[in-house]
Image: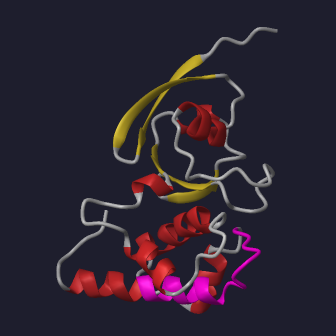
């Protein structure tokens, strides 16, 4: 059976996007192969490692399980969209400063899952942080530095909110 490609439209990192996809193509492949955004990693391909995490309408999702057709009309954010004109997002600087980056393969997914949490809750508990990244596997850091980095980023975001600054 020959399936023809279909045009999908959505917002990606604040910009409108149109791309042709196969009806059963996975979103991680569209991001990496068609849109050339390789920050989203392709790990297990089964939704178990979280390296492919992106935000869809603010929710952390595994793009390796997401049919590309499901993003029509949504707002998608990838790791490439986290940095703003102000520079690195506090999550990015905190991951660097706290040594939460080792091999780096899990880092984009960890940051996206953490961002989904901090966008909704600027003062998460340790348990909430652990829950937010529970779908992300890291084989290098042991998670303590990652949790510390997320707590540090939350402090930075609260401090900037007091100053009237906002990270988009």
Q: Is residue 1 left or right of residue 24?
A: right
Nearest to the observer: residue 119 or residue 28: 28
Q: Tell me the quarter of the image containing the C terminus.
A: bottom left
Q: In this view, which residue lies farthest toward the left?
A: 164
Residue 90, horizontal then vertical, whole percent = 38, 76
Q: Is residue 150 magenta?
A: yes
Q: Residue at x 69, y 82 (%)?
A: 141
Q: Residue at x 58, y 18 (%)?
A: 6
Q: Residue at x 42, y 84 (%)?
A: 154
Q: Is residue 49 above or below residue 70?
A: below
Residue 101, horizontal then vertical, whole percent = 59, 76
Image color mode: secondary structure
Residues in magenta, as a range = 136-153
Residue 53, horizontal then vertical, whole percent = 61, 57
Q: Is residue 60 left or right of residue 51?
A: left
Q: Is residue 9 above or below residue 151?
A: above
Residue 152, horizontal then vertical, whole percent = 44, 88
Q: Is residue 141 magenta?
A: yes
In which image quadrant can residue 33 be found?
top right
Say how many tags the image has. Answer: 0
Q: Is residue 82 left or right of residue 127?
A: left
Q: Tell me the quarter of the image containing the N terminus.
A: top right
Nearest to the observer: residue 152 or residue 103: 103
Q: Is residue 20 left or right of residue 24?
A: left
Q: In this view, which residue lies farthest toward the front?
A: 103
């Amino acid at each position: 059976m020959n399936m023809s490609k279909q045009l999908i439209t959505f917002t990606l990192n604040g910009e409108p996007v149109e791309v042709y996809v196969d009806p059963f193509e996975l979103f991680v492949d569209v991001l990496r192969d068609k849109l050339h955004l390789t920050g989203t990693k392709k790990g297990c391909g089964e939704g178990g490692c979280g390296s492919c995490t992106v935000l869809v309408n603010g929710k952390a999702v595994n793009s390796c399980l997401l049919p590309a057709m499901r993003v029509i009309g949504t707002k998608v954010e990838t790791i490439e969209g986290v940095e703003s004109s102000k520079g690195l997002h506090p999550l990015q600087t905190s991951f660097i400063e706290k040594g939460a980056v080792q091999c780096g393969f899990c880092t984009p997914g960890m940051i996206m899952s953490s961002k989904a949490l901090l966008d909704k809750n600027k003062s998460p508990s340790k348990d909430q942080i652990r829950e937010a990244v529970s779908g992300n596997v890291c084989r290098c850091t042991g998670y303590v530095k990652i949790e510390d980095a997320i707590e540090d980023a939350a402090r930075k975001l609260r401090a900037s909110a007091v100053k009237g600054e906002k990270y988009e």
